Image: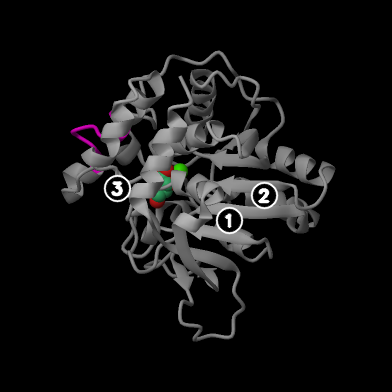
Amino acid sequence: PRRIIIDTDPGQDDAVAILLALASPELKVESITTVAGNVPLSQTTKNACALLELAGREDVPVYAGAARPLYKAPISAEHVHGETGMAGANLPEPHLRARSVDAATHIIDVLRKEPAGTITLVCLGPMTNLAHALTHAPDIAPKIAHLVAMGGAQREGGNITPTAEFNFFVDPHAAKIVMAAGIPTTLLPLDVTHRAIATPRRLAPIADLKTPVGDMVVRMLGAEDRFEKMKYGWEGGALHDPMTIGWLLRPDLFSGRECNVEIEVESPLCLGQSVVDLWKVTNRPPNALWIDNVDSDAFYTLLMERLARLI
Ligand code: BDR
Ligand code: CA
């Protein structure tokens, strides 16, 4: 199996991504590293531990990382994910605790120890931990097999400012460092994640599983007072982060193009914007595979089949 480290800020959709990864034999989750994002660090760490207990995977170590972005003041997204970050999950207080080593140190240690090209990083939140790791240890960049990250938006526009997607907006300086590090990178921006809304039709087979995991996913994504339903009149919640795992499992379901992606860090109006050279109007070399389409129904079928393997 492909060995992955999941860096995350759970987060309702982060939770589904973690469960999808744990349920997939093609992937071996080496560890989970946490970061402040949707909710503060103590809560994202607690949520990661609670999810591992739910899945019966206390063997996966958790490492807590950055409590705040590199330079900006922290912002969070309780308005979307609820006070706990996983509204609707209703998981019990976990016994599992994070290890004593911090996330960036752990990432550096693993990448230095393992052969080049064996560890894939999956980033589901602000890229602060990875930026810290790359800044302290630039030698790890060529050792990363691949980086798959949820972040950015272009055609779709932003979801936290008119031009910026949440993960890149929370820590634009970190995203800039990571995108400049020369790591083979795949980005799953809002341009693709907004094509995979959790509609009642897509959630029904997951509800039919009648398992604790299936029920929890439906409670989180299908809730009547779900943010996207209330604010946009959508049929359900957006399922951003699981697209990263979906791409690792079934890249054939996705399409996009190799292009240059730069992160705006100076403009007050456009802070955190991903500036994507879709039409090669600059000479800047491609630094990412920018995914902008998915077979959404096939993705939901995959998700349902995998979640069925958990309790
Ligand atoms: C991203 O922001 C977070 O709220 C989600 O978990 C996802 O990672 C979407 O913009
Ligand atoms: Ca996230």
Separation of marks 3 and 1 at Cα, in angstroms: 28 Å
Q: Residue 18 at x, y = what percent? A: 51, 35
Magenta stretch encompasses residue 225: yes
Separation of marks 2 and 1 at Cα, in angstroms: 8 Å
Q: Residue 237 at x, y = what percent? A: 28, 42
In this rendered view, identify the residue nearer to me: 307 or 164.
307
Circle 3 or circle 2, nearest the eye: 3
Hey, what amino acid is under mark 3?
Ile
Q: Are marks 2 and 1 in contact (CB under 8 Å)?
A: yes
Q: Magenta residues? A: 219-227
**In the rendered image, which residue does mark 3 sit on?**
197
Hey, what amino acid is under mark 1?
Ala
Separation of marks 3 and 2 at Cα, in angstroms: 33 Å
**In the rendered image, which residue does mark 1 sit on?**
174
Residue name at image x 55 percent, y 13 percent: 95
In this rendered view, identify the residue nearer to me: 52 or 173.
52
Query: Looking at the figure, which quarter contains the C terminus?
Result: top left
Q: Are marks 3 and 2 in contact (CB under 8 Å)?
A: no
Nearest to N terminus: mark 3 or mark 1: 1
> Seen in the image, is 286 located left or right of residue 113?
left
Relative height, residue 302 to residue 196 (above, below): above
Instruction: Look at the numbered disc 2 and give the secondary structure of its residue.
Output: helix
Residue name at image x 67 percent, y 61 percent: 183
Nearest to N terminus: mark 3 or mark 2: 2
Residue name at image x 54 percent, y 46 percent: 249
Instruction: Look at the numbered disc 1 and give the secondary structure of its residue.
Output: helix
